[in-house]
Amino acid sequence: MAGRLYFMRHGETTLNRQGIWQGRIDSRLSEKGIEQARAAGDHIRETDLEIDAAFCSPLGRARQTIETALPDQAYVTDEGLQEISFGSLEGQPNVDGVIGPYGDYFKRFGGESEDEACGRICAAVDAIAIDHVDENVLVVSHGTMGRLFSTRWSDGTAPKWLPNCCLMEFAYDAAEHAFAYEGIWAPGEGVSDDWTWTGR
């Protein structure tokens, strides 16, 4: 693949700041989230990264992120890029302080397992990549989905926690339908392998 896949997590939201399970419900970016999105856009422009095609989760926080970062960039929404479903936990505070990996935790609340969500995000991104083999493609999605995708394709080299508005780079092997993790850029706090990291 001459081009690359760039996977971005959305910016921080008001519910992120409150420790609320978000999933498929939505909230606007916080002021910090807006700053993170602008920083990501600046990074893309300053490194002369040309985005040939862009795809985004249909959830508002992801759309607000790409529209803030790259206001002139056309994009297509894709249902497969949505965050993992937390079921009836969505909109509720994480009072038990549950942290990932989640495994089947959300299934008991009517949500998705991590295996189900990983299969969904990998299929969605593969379908996008196969249609844009020789291009630089941007995908804007969510924290858990980015972690599942990067864990699947990084051989343990990607960070466990993905900061808001981080940008992960992957090469793509169209013949094998396989991705290769090549690195990450993140604004502000940087990255961490600590599951209890408070920078998220």
Image (cartoon, rainbow, N blue to C red):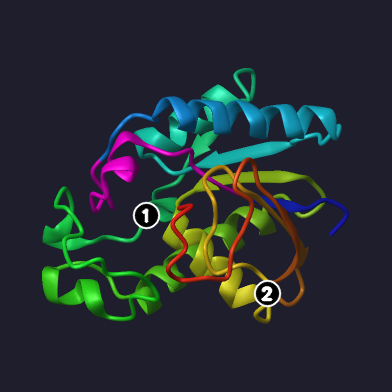
Q: Earlier in the sequence, mark 2 or mark 1?
A: 1
Amino acid at the residue labelled 1 = Glu
Q: In this view, does 166 lie to the left or right of 25?
A: right
Q: Which mark is residue 154?
A: 2
- Report which quarter residue 72 is drawn in: top right
- Report which quarter residue 138 is drawn in: top right
**Looking at the image, which is closer to me, 110 or 100?**
100
Residue 124 makes an appearance in the image? yes
Q: Does residue 18 belong to the magenta stretch?
A: yes
Q: Which mark is residue 83?
A: 1
Residue at the image point whose x is 15% and y is 59% from the top: 89
Badge 2 element? loop
Within 10 angstroms of label 1, few (less than 14), some, or many (20 or more) residues?
many
Residue at the image point whose x is 39% and y is 30% from the top: 29
Within 10 angstroms of label 2, few (less than 14), some, or many (20 or more) residues?
some
Amino acid at the residue labelled 2 = Ser
**Looking at the image, which is closer to me, 42 or 2?**
42
180 relative to 37, above or below = below
**Looking at the image, which is closer to me, 1 or 151?**
151
Residue 123 makes an appearance in the image? no
Give the magenta range: 8-25
